[in-house]
């Protein structure tokens, strides 16, 4: 299996906030181009790579969706050279004070998120976490220079570089969800020497963090037969150790629930058991909060399944995942795709698969 780490580190070193994903898309497109037969972008910027199958045309197709957008900040005001900001996506203001960021103005500017002294805050905010509206971004430049280089609407992204920690794990921002993009890339690399009957659409979707936008539009445009959605999920860690969290480094997860087609769930579980690929089962009693919600309800309904990458400290600049979980997820998807037969859809029925859920 190829080393996915250099590619992942490159992805974690660029911004690509929701609606502004081009820096990430450019890196992914360069990596995927030799792995697919066709590649292009949707009208709103999602990346679509096609690997053709070997079955007779017209062929069934599987879409693998992994969102590439990141959460971040946007400038809402400039006062005395300091920037006021608002969130793009689910930013947790508690982790922002002291963070290194990059302001993407007329040029990229290094900056830091600053928290005013307690005596300068409203009394109700003097103790405890400070709301985002009271935090400031400081570039270090004089006020006039800031006005020359920064405008309202400019983006602010995390500037922390990825770090390899002990235990074969990596730490950095936007591992949600570029770790899943890496897993899809592992899958494409595995398929280079594996014939597969079905067409494969490798998709890096946009704007998932603000509304699953790319998931809806790519599913509608490509109209696949089935969809595999790969996203991160909550790993066990400090303060997170109940049934809704999963161990890190013990394999990817397979989700069950109303958002998941039971026959696809069954197929993946049986395949993982057969190949002895570690897999943790997780549960989503409602929709999963992933692009699978979009794929499942697009057009007449696309049978969907969700593969998860366990991740600690979600939506912070220090997200943590295990490299082997990424690799195992990629291998499992490749094995599933290589085993798809032209008549697979004749065998999957919602109720029959549901009876076998365990």
Image: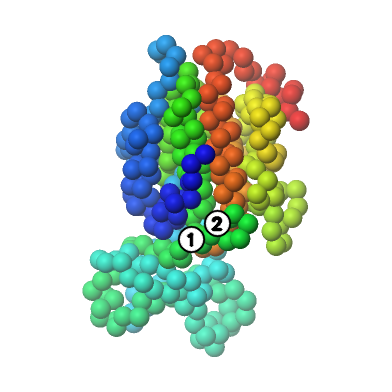
Q: Residue furthest bottom?
A: 119
In the picture, residue 349 is in which quadrant? top right
Q: Is residue 68 left or right of residue 150?
A: right
Query: Of the numbered discs in the image, which one, if any, rests on residue 312?
Result: none
Query: Of the numbered discs in the image, which one, if any, rests on residue 162?
Result: 1
Q: Position of residue 305 (x, y in %)?
A: 59, 32
Query: Of the numbered discs in the image, which one, if any, rests on residue 170?
Result: 2
For the residue pair 181 and 20, the one nearer the viewer reads as 181
Residue drawn at 65 percent across, 43 percent down: 251
Within-10-Å neighbours for mark 1: few <14, some 14–19, many 20+:
many
Residue drawn at 69 percent across, 22 percent down: 353
For the residue pair 80 and 204, the one nearer the viewer reads as 204
Q: Position of residue 334 (x, y in %)?
A: 53, 30
Q: Position of residue 162 (x, y in %)?
A: 48, 60
Q: Secondary structure at mark 1?
A: loop
In the picture, residue 309 is in which quadrant? top right
Is residue 157 among what the camera can see?
yes
What colour scheme does the image use? Answer: rainbow
Q: Secondary structure at mark 2?
A: strand
Q: Is residue 342 left or right of residue 148?
A: right
Q: CA distance from mark 2 to mark 1?
A: 7 Å
For the residue pair 135 and 99, the one nearer the viewer reads as 99
Is residue 49 among what the camera can see?
no
- Tag 2–tag 1 contact (CB < 8 Å): yes
First in sequence, mark 2 or 1: give its number. 1
Q: Report the quarter where the C terminus lies.
A: top right
Residue drawn at 62 percent across, 76 percent down: 128
Residue drawn at 48 percent across, 41 percent down: 2
In the picture, residue 306 is in which quadrant? top right
Picture layout, residue 209 above or below residue 203: below
């Amino acid at each position: 299996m190829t080393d996915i780490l250099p590619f992942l580190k490159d992805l974690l070193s660029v911004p690509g906030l929701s609606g502004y994903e081009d820096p990430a898309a450019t890196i992914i497109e360069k990596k995927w181009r030799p792995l697919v037969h066709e590649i292009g972008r949707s009208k709103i910027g999602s990346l679509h790579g096609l690997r053709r199958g070997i079955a007779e045309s017209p062929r069934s197709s599987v879409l693998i969706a992994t969102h590439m957008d990141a959460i971040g900040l946007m400038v809402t005001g400039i006062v005395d050279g300091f920037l006021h900001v608002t969130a793009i996506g689910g930013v947790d203001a508690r982790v922002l004070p002291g963070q290194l960021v990059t302001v993407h103005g007329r040029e990229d500017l290094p900056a830091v998120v600053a928290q005013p002294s307690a005596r300068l805050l409203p009394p109700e905010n003097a103790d405890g976490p400070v709301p985002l509206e009271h935090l400031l971004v400081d570039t270090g430049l004089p006020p006039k220079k800031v006005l020359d280089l920064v405008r309202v609407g400019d983006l602010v992204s995390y500037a922390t570089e990825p770090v390899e920690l002990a235990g074969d794990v990596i730490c950095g921002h936007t591992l949600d969800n570029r770790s899943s993009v890496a897993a899809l890339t592992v899958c494409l690399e595995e398929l280079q020497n594996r014939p597969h009957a079905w067409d494969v659409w490798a998709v890096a979707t946009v704007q998932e963090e603000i509304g699953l936008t790319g998931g809806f539009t790519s599913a509608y445009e490509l109209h696949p037969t089935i969809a595999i959605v790969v996203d991160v999920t909550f790993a066990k860690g400090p303060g997170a150790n109940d049934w809704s969290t999963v161990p890190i480094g013990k394999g990817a997860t397979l989700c069950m629930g109303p958002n998941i087609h039971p026959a696809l769930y069954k197929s993946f579980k049986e395949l993982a058991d057969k190949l002895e690929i570690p897999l943790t089962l997780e549960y989503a009693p409602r929709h999963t909060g992933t692009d699978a919600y979009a794929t499942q309800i697009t057009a007449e309904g696309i049978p969907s399944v969700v593969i998860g990458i366990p991740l600690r400290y979600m939506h912070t600049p220090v997200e943590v995942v295990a490299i082997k979980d990424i690799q195992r997820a990629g291998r499992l998807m490749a094995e599933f795709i290589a085993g798809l037969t032209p008549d697979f859809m004749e065998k999957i029925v919602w109720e029959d698969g549901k009876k076998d859920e365990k």
